[in-house]
Amino acid sequence: MSELLQSQAWKALQEHYQGVSSVHMRDLFAQDAERFEHFSQHFNDMLVDFSKNIITDETMSLLMQLAKDRDVPGWIERMFAGEKINNTENRAVLHTALRNRSNTPVLVDGEDVMPDVNRVLAQMREFT
């Protein structure tokens, strides 16, 4: 974590925060009548709305730079590949397996974990 906090991208975000921390949400909407359209995205049937956060185009640019610098796309790829990216427990995170309704095999160390995931999900369904 200290590497993150020492990065230029993080420092730029901290500096930016100082400039926007006293901004009021009502002022941001008053300055941009299309703020909702500007800071929201649809992904299939899901709406992600950032407009009600104290952010600007610069905020988003700085956040994207931080994500790029921290290799978020690479970590996402490693997560989907079943690599052991949970460093605390030295295991794969398997978030994708829990939401894998297509039942496509999810391999960890060469073994499909979906039968175990489905078994536990069925137990949870029965319990609840």
Image: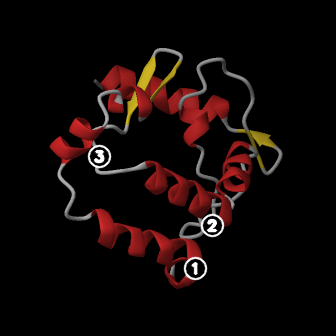
10, 128: nearer the viewer: 10
Q: Secondary structure at mark 1?
A: loop
Q: Is residue 106 left or right of residue 38?
A: right
The mark tally for this picture is 3
Q: Residues within 10 Å of mark 2 (few under 14, many from 20)?
A: few
Residue 48: image x %, image y %?
A: 41, 31
Residue 44: image x %, image y %?
A: 53, 16
Residue with the mark numbered 3:
53
Which mark lies nearer to you, 1 or 2?
1
Q: What amino acid is at disc 3? A: Asn
Is 123 located above or below residue 24 in the figure?
A: above
Is 85 located above or below residue 97 in the figure?
A: below
Q: Label 1 vs label 2: CA separation?
A: 25 Å
Q: What amino acid is at disc 1? A: Ser
Residue 35: image x %, image y %?
A: 34, 33
In the picture, residue 123 is in which quadrant?
top left
For marks 3 and 2, the one nearer the N-term is 3
Which mark lies nearer to you, 3 or 2?
3
Q: Secondary structure at mark 3?
A: loop
Residue at far right of view: 110
Residue with the mark numbered 1:
7
Q: Residues within 10 Å of mark 1 (few under 14, many from 20)?
A: few
Residue with the mark numbered 2:
90
Q: Residues within 10 Å of mark 3 (few under 14, many from 20)?
A: few
Q: Secondary structure at mark 2?
A: loop
Is 8 located above or below residue 96 in the figure?
A: below
Q: Label 1 vs label 3: CA separation?
A: 24 Å
Q: Is residue 11 left or right of residue 51?
A: right
